[in-house]
Amino acid sequence: MEEKRIVLTKPYFSLDGDSCGDHQKPPNLIQLILSLFKNVRPGADLTKLQLPPHFNSTKSFLQYLGESIYCVNSDMLGKCNSGKTPLERFIAVVAWCISTMRPLIYGSAPYNAILGETHHVTRGTLNVLLEQVSHHPPVTALHATDEKENLEVLCCTYPNPKFYGTSVEVLMHGKRQLKLLNHGETYILSSPNISVKFIPPRIEWTGSCTIRCLETGLEAELSYGKKSFLGFRGNPRSIKGKIFDSSSSKPLFEIGGQWDRTITLKDLDRGEVRVIYNAKEVLSGLKTPIVNDPKGVWPSESAVVWGEVNEGILTGDWEKATEAKRAVEENQRELLKERKSKGETWIPKHFVVSYNKEDGWDCSPTEKIISPAPIVVPFNC
């Protein structure tokens, strides 16, 4: 039996312009981008477009999504649970939500996860499991549990990238839930979208995000800043928003700042202002997860599926990376043909998946508790 190649890399994003990843950028990036899209019609759905490895960041989308939950320097989720009042807990949830919007690096995208791919990681008492439950359209499910804190995170995410001539807009469909079981509170969170501009080259979070607690009636609206062609109308990394009571629509707090720097909260009754999120404290110095039990790593793990591709990118061997990526994609096509010939329907292992036109995709975990993983994030990460 061929030995599994488990290739894990550092969290990949840019804070204050510094790359935190292992990816090596190829030359003439703009030329590569323009050549890639020259035969794509404006408005086209890009979910089936296969990018060459030059554009990849040695991460699967599963890892990218998982890192937003488990790669932090401070226990943002624990703070959500430790608030003494519903309002304190809600403010902590807002800060946690902002922390999951990681800075992005232009010209670098995660791999499109293959059907059945998984990512299973532990950080402290938090256990996180992701599975690619659909390939066309791409749907990713996430379930995280922390028995010590008695909390649970559920996500069902299905991005929809579209090409518009001078930009790619990625609509981040789906919803996230955070359950604080000790307090009987469920928080529903949406996500802003991603905008990739070619001229001038930049990538940013755009649009709005909502957070609401079903039991307390507290809600928040966050607007992610955006600038024009000449760079006016504010900073693209800015956030403005408010927290209010949905029963009266009365604003309680104003939110402002930059999601890659600091976010402040202003009490509208008292006029007091305080910092609720500091990106440098939360995201700086993150380290690579480690494998505690190689034999316990599933063949479907992202670090195994894309291990050989990662090796090619990290060493700058683009021919090896291209061949390895093509092999992964060809294998998926062969498996699909085989299932069709047998009349079989693929069924996820860790989630029950449903879809309807009104609510979209929904992913329910088959297990109440996620078990500890063979891949572990160090505490000093």
Image: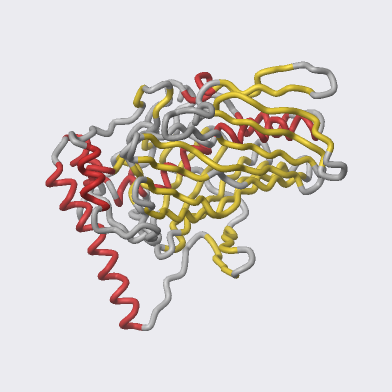
Q: Quadrant of residue 243?
A: top right
Between 114 and 206, which is closer to the camera in this rendering?
A: 206
Q: Residue at the far right: name it.
A: 248
**Residue drawn at (38%, 83%), measured in percent from left and top?**
343
- Residue 50 image point, x, y percent: 28, 56
In the displayed structure image, the side of residue 315 where residue 208 appears, left or right: right
- Residue 375 image point, x, y percent: 41, 40
In the rendered picture of this protein, how many numbered marks are placed on residues? 0
Point out the image quarter for the N terminus. bottom left
- Residue 344 image point, x, y percent: 39, 79
Q: Is residue 296 visible?
A: no
**Residue drawn at (70%, 23%), measured in percent from left and top?**
265
Between 106 and 5, which is closer to the camera in this rendering?
A: 106
In the displayed structure image, the side of residue 370 where residue 131 appears, left or right: left
In the displayed structure image, the side of residue 225 where residue 106 appears, left or right: left
Q: Quadrant of residue 267?
A: top right
Between 132 and 242, which is closer to the camera in this rendering?
A: 242
- Residue 27 image point, x, y percent: 18, 34
**Residue drawn at (70%, 17%), measured in percent from left and top?**
274
Color style of the picture: secondary structure
Up/down of 358 relative to 221, above or below:
below
Up/down of 270 relative to 210, above or below:
above
Between 179 and 318, which is closer to the camera in this rendering?
A: 318
Point out the image quarter for the C terminus. top left
Q: Is residue 352 visible?
A: yes
Up/down of 130 relative to 264, above or below:
below
**Residue drawn at (57%, 68%), measured in percent from left and top?**
354
